[in-house]
Image (tube, rainbow, N blue to C red):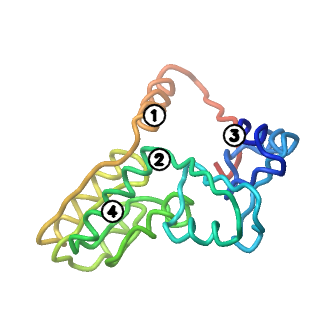
Amino acid sequence: AVDLSKKTDGPVQPFGPLIHNAQVMEELTEQNIYPFEQMSDVNGGTVLVRAHGVHPEAFDQLRDTGADVYDATCPLVRKVQKIITKYSNDDYDIVIVGDDHHAEVMGLKGYTSTSCHVVADEKEAESLPNFERVCVVSQTTQNDDTFARTVEVVKQKANVIRATNTVCEPTRDHQSETVDLAHRVDLMVVVGGQHS
């Protein structure tokens, strides 16, 4: 985003905040980077699709505004998009383990042509319908254990299941390092945005 802002005349407009850190976002506005939340807020210019990705139709909608669109979707998120597309095209229903209101998950849902269900965990998975064929993936920032427990519940509801743990390696590393550190200290303080 910063590199792009140096190469363009007008502002760079990320689709949503690039990072969940108010101080960094404030610094970015000083570099002519202004996020937008609604498609109606775009009127041409330079638009950056952030790491979370967006649903496929969003690219066309953004280009229809006359904007130059740059895709910065994380390659690990793109991998999940491809898995969903492949299995959905093969007539599998899709279950995404994650937060239904997270930007990544909202984008992922757009890659399905079959029914798509989002569940936070195994408890929510208990209310899923039965499936003839189902593909289960994870939001990349989910938890391995939650994914595994949820898959076990979905297995009981499916004739054929394809489950791919798509939790990304950096997330996995951060989670295990946090657990390790928690066992070695008396107190942990997490500094960050409330909505992160």
- The residue pinned by badge 1 equals 170
Q: Quadrant of residue 122?
A: bottom left
Check if mark 1's residue and mark 3's residue have beta carbons within 8 Å.
no
Which is more foreground, mark 2 or mark 4? 4
- The residue pinned by badge 4 equals 84
Considering the image in quadrants, where does the N terminus appear? top right
Q: CA distance from mark 1 to mark 3?
A: 18 Å
Q: CA distance from mark 1 to mark 2?
A: 9 Å
Give the mark nearer the N terminus: 2 vs 4.
Answer: 4
Check if mark 1's residue and mark 4's residue have beta carbons within 8 Å.
no
Give the mark nearer the N terminus: 1 vs 2.
Answer: 2
Check if mark 2's residue and mark 4's residue have beta carbons within 8 Å.
no
Horizontally, is 99 left or right of 34 in the view? left
Q: Nearer the viewer, residue 63 or 94?
A: 63
- The residue pinned by badge 2 equals 141
Give the mark nearer the N terminus: 4 vs 3.
Answer: 4
Relative to 53, residue 176 above or below: above
Which is more foreground, mark 4 or mark 3? 4
* Mark 2 secondary-structure assignment: loop
Horizontally, is 137 left or right of 196 in the view? left
Check if mark 2's residue and mark 3's residue have beta carbons within 8 Å.
no
Q: Residue furthest right?
A: 30
Instruction: Identify residue type, mark 3.
Output: Gly
Give the mark nearer the N terminus: 1 vs 4.
Answer: 4
Give the mark nearer the N terminus: 1 vs 3.
Answer: 1
Give the mark nearer the N terminus: 2 vs 3.
Answer: 2
Q: Residue at x 26, y 71 (%)?
A: 89
- The residue pinned by badge 3 equals 192
Which is more foreground, mark 1 or mark 4? 4
Circle 1: is it few (<14), some (14-19), or many (20+) Cα within 10 Å? few
